[in-house]
Amino acid sequence: MRNTLILLLFFLALGAFSCDKDQLRVPGEEEESAGEPPVPDTVRYLALGDSYTIGQSVSYADRWPVQLASQLRARFPDTTYYIEQPDIIARTGWTAGNLLQAIAAADTLQPPYGLVSLLIGVNNQFQNRPIDIYRSDFKALLEQAISFAGNDTSRVIVLSIPDYAFTPFGQNRPNPNLISMEIDNYNAINREITECYGVAYFDITPISRQGLAQPQLVASDGLHPSGAMYARWVEEVLGYVVGILE
């Protein structure tokens, strides 16, 4: 009887220490699995330009760089990317030379940026500046943009200059056709330089030329794009930007 009781106690003890493999726990393992979720990568966006980038005559939310950032947030969950509001260096009336000066004077820039956009030149045309000056200034600006993107050319996008001849303001100028011809000349230069550097170029000028046929694409000032037109620009670039982030 005594031997039987000893054997029974032995097997009970053995059963107490036997367990399924999935039940085993390494010290600290549970704490690690229950840790904080991974921190998403932050995408910082720098937009360089003039009135078309600052969004003259539209709300902050309707500016095309702000619309782009909003669309990217909708595409990527917070666990993947945190898309910051864009840093914008732009002002109505700026030429390419003015933008260069503003960049040189800026003390809040924090490169590298995950995305840099550049749209500049309409005021060079409007102010009848020598086109050769635009060529050299645009080249310098594109090199700056690439530098701000950590020398990753895939992270830089250039947009063509819109054609303001297709607005009520442009139609009241002495020669709207000449405006269009000169805008084409400026865009030929910025496109050539952009493609030479291997940077993505987006021709949004045809969209701007729908401003007379579709008045809703022009802002209330009769000159600048409306939020609706900026949304179409965003449609042009969104697929590319999503691709480089993925």
Image: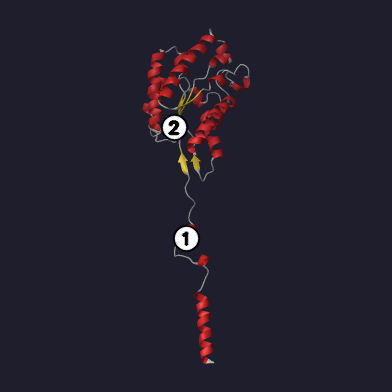
Q: Residues within 10 Å of mark 1 (few under 14, many from 20)?
A: few
In the orientation shown, which residue stands out farthest toward the top? 174
The scheme the figure's colours follow is secondary structure
Q: In this rendering, is residue 12 above or below 47?
A: below
- SS for dot 1: helix
Number of marks: 2
Q: Quadrant of residue 192?
A: top left
Q: What residue is shown at x 51% (from left), y 30% (from top)?
A: 65
Can I make out residue 235 in this image? Answer: yes
Q: What residue is shown at x 53% (from left), y 80% (from top)?
A: 12
Q: Which label sits in the foreground, 1 or 2?
A: 2
Which amino acid does the dot numbered 2 rest on? Answer: Ser
Residue 154: numbered disc: 2
Q: In this rendering, is residue 53 above or below 83?
A: above
Towards the viewer: 190 or 121: 190
- SS for dot 2: helix
The alpha-carbon separation of the residues under discs 1 and 2 comes to 40 Å
Q: Which residue is mark 1?
A: 31
